[in-house]
Amino acid sequence: DQQVKQNSPSLSVQEGRISILNCDYTNSMFDYFLWYKKYPAEGPTFLISISSIKDKNEDGRFTVFLNKSAKHLSLHIVPSQPGDSAVYFCAASDSGAGSYQLTFGKGTKLSVIP
Amino acid sequence: NAGVMQNPRHLVRRRGQEARLRCSPMKGHSHVYWYRQLPEEGLKFMVYLQKENIIDESGMPKERFSAEFPKEGPSILRIQQVVRGDSAAYFCASFLRTGGGLAKNIQYFGAGTRLSVL
């Protein structure tokens, strides 16, 4: 039972254009969402997060949008840079569960082409 | 990332041996999570510990796996009698629990230990 789904295993984008990574979830108890970036042989690096009381959060080139009714969130990167090439993981947590454990999607591999 | 230290980075064990993975959290963090990543998969929660306490071990396999976070020293994930299916990347994350609201409840990950079972 996959509660967080990233349906696109890979995405290729031209440098300078917008990258849009999508994530869907099924558990309506999730109230905090995070995006992590991961390079090979390294650990995930926190990028940006959003709580369920908001529908948008922006940090520099990164913006996360949350559509609670659709149980969908997306990460926008603009403009995309070659250094953004990595695997991006969407993660969610249920603060009511107490442990704040993260449930991850399988990731989307982003390739930014120079 | 740089603040959470995991060692060893790579660990090779033969079937039936024991594996010990260590994690030191970021300075000031007293909460630690362990996650496992199988090839082509996302990270899966295993266990959540506070100093000297296991808070949530609902993701731990019932047998052969144990975890601890003593008052002094790193958190240890221990796998007894390893099997080939235990081959994976094991990540530790540390967490500064702010006690209210969600704004700062972000987990910071170490570089991971890649366990290979021959």
Image (cartoon, coloured by chain):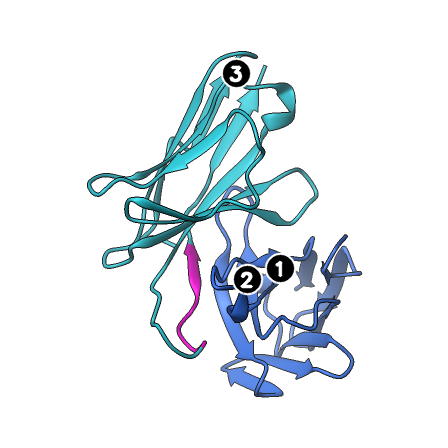
Disc number at residue B28? none
Dot 1 falls on a residue whose secondary structure is strand
Q: Tell me which amino acid carries mark 3.
A: Gln
Q: Position of residue A76 (x, y in %)?
A: 65, 77
Are both tags, 3 and 1, on one chain?
no
Q: Colour of chain A?
A: blue
Q: Position of residue B4 (x, y in %)?
A: 34, 50
Q: Colour of chain B?
A: cyan
Question: Which of the chains bears the disc numbered 1?
Answer: A
Q: Are marks 3 and 1 in contact (CB under 8 Å)?
A: no
Mark 2–mark 1 distance (CA, rounded to whole Å): 5 Å
User: Mark 2 or 1 closer to N-term?
Assistant: 2
Q: Are marks 2 and 3 in contact (CB under 8 Å)?
A: no
From the image, tell me which residue sits under label 2: A36
Specify the quadrant that holds the N terminus of chain B. Answer: bottom left
Dot 2 falls on a residue whose secondary structure is strand
Instruction: Verify whether residue B107 appears in magenta.
Output: yes
Q: Tell me which amino acid carries mark 1.
A: Phe
From the image, tell me which residue sits under label 1: A89
Question: Which of the chains bears the disc numbered 3?
Answer: B
Question: Which of the chains bears the disc numbered 2?
Answer: A
Residue depicted at x 76% and y 55%: A9
From the image, tell me which residue sits under label 3: B81
Mark 2–mark 3 distance (CA, rounded to whole Å): 33 Å
Specify the quadrant that holds the C terminus of chain B. Answer: top right
- Name the one closer to the observer, A93 or B2: A93
Q: Count neighbours of disc 3 (C-alpha within 10 A) and say few if under 14, some if 14 to 19, many if 20 or more.
A: some
Q: Are marks 2 and 1 in contact (CB under 8 Å)?
A: yes
